[in-house]
Image: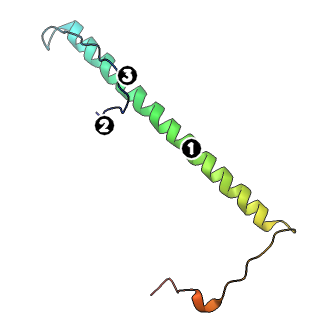
Amino acid sequence: MFAPSEKEQEVRVIHLSHQHDARYIEAQLGIERRNKLTQVRTLLQNASALLEEATRLLEQTTDINSPNATVEVFNSDEIIPIDQ
């Protein structure tokens, strides 16, 4: 399972019979399928957001590489080496 949803939703309570009953097993499988599908939907939404961000970065890179791009000059004394 994964963290609870932030949404306020009423939860449907399903009363199942004993653990070895066929209805219980089928209901448990259904609940697991639903949870996996919800997790996949969340992963796809996150992937979509990351792809949009990557597209924006690529568009910015394209703008930087254009012949009309401007360059900002920094004072090299203000640049701190990474390995410090």
Q: CA distance from mark 3 to mark 1?
A: 23 Å
Q: In the rendered image, which residue does mark 2 sit on?
A: 3
Q: CA distance from mark 2 to mark 3?
A: 14 Å
**Residue 64, percent across and down?**
76, 66
Residue where numbered disc 1 is placed: 49
For the C terminus, which image quadrant?
bottom left
Element type at marker 1? helix
Q: Is residue 36 above or below residue 29?
A: below
Which residue is at 66% across, 57% downward?
A: 57
Label 2, label 1: how far apart the Cα atoms are: 20 Å
Q: Of residues 66 and 31, which is closer to you in this image? A: 66
Q: Quadrant of the N terminus?
A: top left
Q: Picture coordinates of residue 30 (x, y %)?
A: 33, 16
Give the labeled residue for mark 3. Answer: 34
Q: Which residue is located at x 30 percent, y 37 percent?
A: 3
N-terminal-most mark, 3 or 1: 3
Give the mark nearest the N terminus, 2 or 1.
2
Task: Say whether disc 2 or disc 3 marks the residue closer to the N-terminus.
Answer: 2
Going by the numbered disc 3, the residue's amino acid type is Arg
Q: Pointer 2: residues within 10 angstroms few (<14), some, or many (20+)? A: few
Where is residue 71 shown, x and y percent of the image? 77, 76
